[in-house]
Amino acid sequence: MYQRIEVEDFVQKEREAKLVALADRLAVRFAERASKHDREGSFPIENFEELRQEGCMKLTVPREFGGDELSLYELVLFLERIAKGDGSTAIALGWHLGSILHFRTTRHWPAHLFERLCRRAVTAGELYNGYASESGVGSPSRGMKPRTVASRTEGGWLLSGRKTYSTLLPIINHFSVSASLEGEGATGDFYVDRSEGVGMEETWDTLGMRSTGSHDLLLDRVFVPESSLISLTPDGQSRQRPNDGLGYLLFIAACYTGLASAARDYTVTFARTYKPDSLGTAIGELPLIQQQIGLIEADLITVRTMLYTMARRWDQEPEQRAQLKADLGLAKYMATNRALQIADRAMRVVGGSSMFRSNPLERIYRDIRAGVHNPPLDDLVLRELARRALEEPGV
Ligand SMILES: Cc1cc2nc3c(=O)[nH]c(=O)nc-3n(C[C@H](O)[C@H](O)[C@H](O)COP(=O)(O)OP(=O)(O)OC[C@H]3O[C@@H](n4cnc5c(N)ncnc54)[C@H](O)[C@@H]3O)c2cc1C
């Protein structure tokens, strides 16, 4: 029998099937809570407690430290399904799991710090995230110089400043931050424990992804020992670390694809079952509706194919990872922009009732809007594609 391209088609191994089953089980419960947390802008602590109980915080941790060492492909598969239940939970968890996968590949952290980060995820289910964004200096993707300052003190550093968009902040106990070294013409990345001087201002009142807890992180003379300096970059130079093509950022594409997929499922069910009196049959019988659903399918199949192809290639072609960067960026560009289109079409099919807060499409539409503000940024992806085309030999 002919198989359609569905997410199941990308599930090829027993371990992948188990991951998908776990994600599906969790996503059902997350979906039940999504609307309440979205409305209140509250952090879904229960979701993270359940993820912790299921051992999900150690999914990408290397085996040598007791983790499951998921491949990028497996991570993408898992997060797409989680996002079908709740986009906020998926993207917040994705920063933790994706970052560990990235550090596992590049090993650019000092070994003792990376081991500590991993052991904390394994033994206590602790979450990690990196905080680089700040107000008024521009996105970290564009190489901004932090206004957060690190000044030398005996045995280490004192960090002071404010970070914006600090996803997971309500429940995080350790994180990394970037800071300019006072009077030294360099930027440092520091590993920080939630300790005296660390605060939070609840600023995250946004259009979408409202339950990610991405509030402002406040740092007031927070002591960080010398041994917690991750890396140091002199001004005017770019960060020195192995180039793995930033494959881990595909987790972002996976989350927005999962949201688009949830919109698609809702819409298809609606079109099958909604029979207005004026029509006497399901709206799915109408050519106009079929056209819209066909376009939704075309977009979803395209982004999924691109997403899983790139994840597989990144896993299987380690020596090519740096060269894959442009196509990895394209997969994210396609996923987020097509997701916007899918959500818009889904709402047109469902009609005015999709605007009610009680309708899941209303939240999904707003959540999807956040995707274009996550890295890699659209203009940087397009510039990279253009550069590659213009430099292609023989054209
Ligand atoms: C849901 C969500 C979660 C996030 N979580 C985190 C997190 O955990 N940690 C973290 O550090 N960050 C996080 N971020 C922040 C994110 O990475 C960006 O820093 C943030 O979205 C601001 O980016 P921006 O492009 O809008 O900002 P800006 O760089 O200020 O851009 C504003 C506008 O100016 C233009 N612009 C600015 N500078 C330039 C330039 N040099 N060249 C050309 N155009 C320019 C941009 O294109 C844009 O149109 C998160 C963001 C979202 C939406």
Image: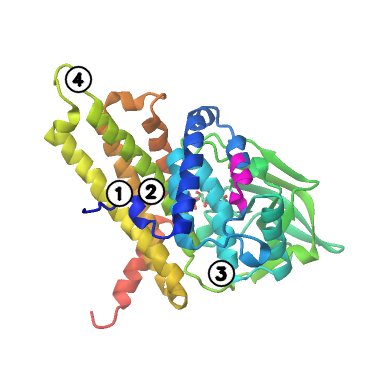
Q: Position of residue 198 (x, y in %)?
A: 74, 45
Q: CA distance from mark 4 to mark 1?
A: 28 Å
- Distance from disc 3 to disc 2, alpha carbons, whole Å, reads 24 Å
Residue closest to the far bottom: 394
Label 2 crowd (10 A; few <14 / some 14-19 / many >=20)? many
In this picture, is 332 found above or below 213? below
- The magenta-colored residue range is 50-57
Looking at this view, is 383 or 363 the one in front? Answer: 363
Q: Residue at x 36, y 43 (%)?
A: 260
Q: Nearer the viewer, residue 238 or 13?
A: 13
Instruction: Report, in whole angstroms, how far the alpha carbon at label 4 lies from the one at label 3.
Output: 55 Å
Q: Position of residue 173 (x, y in %)?
A: 71, 48
The local crowd at label 4, few if under 14, some if 14 to 19, many if 20 or more residues have their Cα within 10 Å, is few
Whether label 3 touches label 2, CB < 8 Å:
no
Residue that mark 2 sits on: 257
- Kindly check if marks 1 and 2 are in contact, taking CB atoms under 8 A apart as contact: yes
Name the N-terminal-most of marks 4 and 3.
3
Residue designated by label 4: 276
Above/below status of 359 relative to 160: above
- Location of residue 352 by image quarter: top left
Magenta stretch secondary structure, dominant: helix
Type of amino acid under label 4: Pro
